[in-house]
């Protein structure tokens, strides 16, 4: 039996690849998406320089870039994981579920939009990246919701249905 760390760092097979891509995109969204936004908001709230009206950030807020363009990478990774997972029954206890990936994509959309509002420090050639990241996260949600709908209507092949468990061999 392989450990979780081995599955995340040295995936073997499609199931491990989905597991690894989901884990690393989730970690990227949390560390380089949520954390800078939370720090920027906390600094702005503590110093009173965050807003110039109810919905507009002050001109010199935040003092650093929130890396909104960098959210394109986890969006791509999560989309690849979602596409790879389409014909696979995913495990139910110790691994990614499609609902986990869909909720992570929704969180990614929210973090991207908040980060986009705060991030004026991007280079000019990267101004499209947060919009592309939000669109890719949205595609993940649509793909997984469509697969879930087809699964609930039992229109998927039998091999695509069911639940994989870590004790089974796939």
Image (cartoon, rainbow, N blue to C red):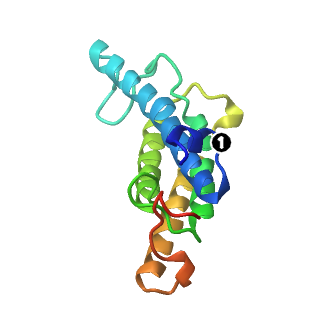
Seen from the viewer's position, the closer of residues 116 and 152 is 152
Can residue 116 be seen here? The reply is no
Q: Quadrant of the C terminus?
A: bottom right
Q: Does 26 appear above or below 84?
A: above
The image shows residue 3 at horizontal and vertical percentages of 52, 42
Seen from the viewer's position, the closer of residues 86 and 49 is 86
The image shows residue 16 at horizontal and vertical percentages of 59, 52
Q: Residue furthest right?
A: 125
The image shows residue 157 at horizontal and vertical percentages of 56, 84
The image shows residue 7 at horizontal and vertical percentages of 57, 45
The image quarter in which residue 44 lies = top left
Q: Residue furthest top?
A: 47
Q: Residue at x 42, y 45 (%)?
A: 110
**Helix, strand, or loop for circle 1?**
loop
Can residue 43 be seen here? The reply is yes
Seen from the viewer's position, the closer of residues 88 and 12 is 12
Q: Residues within 10 Å of mark 1 (few under 14, many from 20)?
A: few
- Total label count? 1
Q: Residue at x 47, y 30 (%)?
A: 31
Q: Residue at x 48, y 65 (%)?
A: 164
Q: Does 59 appear above or below 135?
A: above
36 horizontally vs 82: left or right:
left
Q: Residue at x 54, y 35 (%)?
A: 68
26 horizontally vs 12: left or right:
left
141 horizontally vs 9: left or right:
left
Q: Which residue is mark 1?
A: 10
142 horizontally vs 57: left or right:
right
């Amino acid at each position: 039996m392989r450990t979780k760390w081995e599955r995340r760092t040295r995936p073997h097979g499609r199931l491990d690849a989905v597991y690894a891509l989901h884990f690393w995109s989730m970690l990227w969204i949390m560390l380089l998406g949520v954390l800078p936004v939370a720090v920027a908001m906390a600094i702005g709230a503590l110093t009173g320089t965050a807003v110039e009206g109810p919905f507009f950030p002050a001109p010199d807020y935040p003092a650093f870039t929130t890396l909104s363009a960098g959210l394109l990478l986890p969006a791509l990774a999560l989309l690849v994981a979602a596409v790879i997972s389409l014909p696979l029954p995913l495990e139910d206890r110790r691994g990614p579920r499609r609902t986990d990936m869909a909720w992570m994509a929704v969180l990614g959309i929210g973090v991207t939009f908040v980060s986009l509002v705060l991030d004026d420090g991007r280079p000019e050639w990267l101004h499209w990246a947060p919009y592309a990241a939000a669109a890719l996260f949205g595609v993940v949600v649509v793909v997984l919701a469509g697969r879930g709908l087809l699964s609930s209507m039992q229109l998927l092949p039998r091999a695509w249905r069911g639940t994989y468990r870590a004790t089974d061999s796939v």
